[in-house]
Amino acid sequence: MKCATCGSELEKEALLCHHCGRAVDRAEVIRQEAASRQLSKKEFYQLPGMKACRSNIKTCSIVLYVCAAITILVSVILQGFYLLSFLDGVFLILMGLWLQLGRSRVCALLVTAYGIFNTGIGLVESGRLMGWWIPLAGIWAITYTFRFHKLWSRYRKEGVIPKDAVSGEG
């Protein structure tokens, strides 16, 4: 690891440069460590700047899990086990897992389309706006899965970690 100001070699875990006295920037440490080897997609996802993507994708998945639980409960309790509603809930659980574990843009798009379709059907059948949380979660997931994949693609193409992935700025 080298000092960004004077280029002196720094000791591991150093907080200050012993030569010029400059404070060691944690983002610069991450950038230099990553430049020395290729990060996996999982390691890239764990970078400090990816915290917003991680937390928002996880939140979208949780919204899908809650919607699935409500759908399954309504299917079992109020409708006396209506198979289509039950399968709808299982589908939402699977989409939530795919989104959370796979960080999939395709999943985010599917959830959005599925949510818009279901909300439209509910509006036509009952005259009430129902299930709007699902397309909202899908749109939210689109934003953060596409952001993650954009930064990941830039890293793979250029070989340098984008500043946004390290510091979360920008």
Image: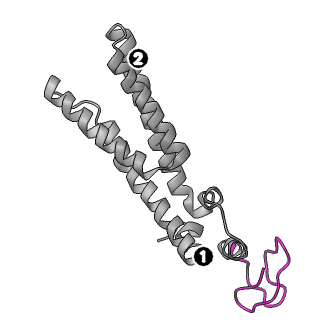
Q: Indicate which disc, 2 or 1, sits on the residue closer to the N terminus.
A: 2
Residue drawn at point x = 73 percent, y = 78 percent? 24
Horizontal side of residue 169 vs 113, given as left or right: right
Q: Quadrant of residue 138?
A: top left
Magenta segment: does it hold 3? yes
Q: Amino acid at mark 1?
A: Gly
Give the prevailing secondary structure in the magenta stretch.
loop
Residue type beneath disc 2: Leu
Secondary structure at numbered mark 1: loop
Please tell me how crowded label 1 is: few (under 14), some (14-19), or many (20+) other residues with Cα within 10 Å: some
Name the mark on residue 159. 1
- Colour setup of the view: one colour
- Residue visible at 36% across and 41% down in the picture: 111
Quote the CA–CA distance across marks 2 and 1: 48 Å
Marker disc for residue 27: none
Q: Residue at x 49, y 60 (%)?
A: 148
Where is residue 13? Give x, y as percent: 82, 70
* Residue 127 visible, this angle: no
The quarter of the picture where the N terminus appears is: bottom right
Q: Give the left or right position of residue 60, taking residue 18 as reference.
A: left
Q: Is residue 162 magenta?
A: no
Which label is found at residue 73? 2
Is residue 74 toward the left or the right of residue 169 in the image?
Answer: left
Number of callouts: 2
Position of residue 166 measured from the top left corner of the image (x, y, whole percent): 60, 68
Looking at the rendered structure, the secondary structure element under dot 2 is helix
Of 150 and 11, which appears nearest the observer?
Answer: 150
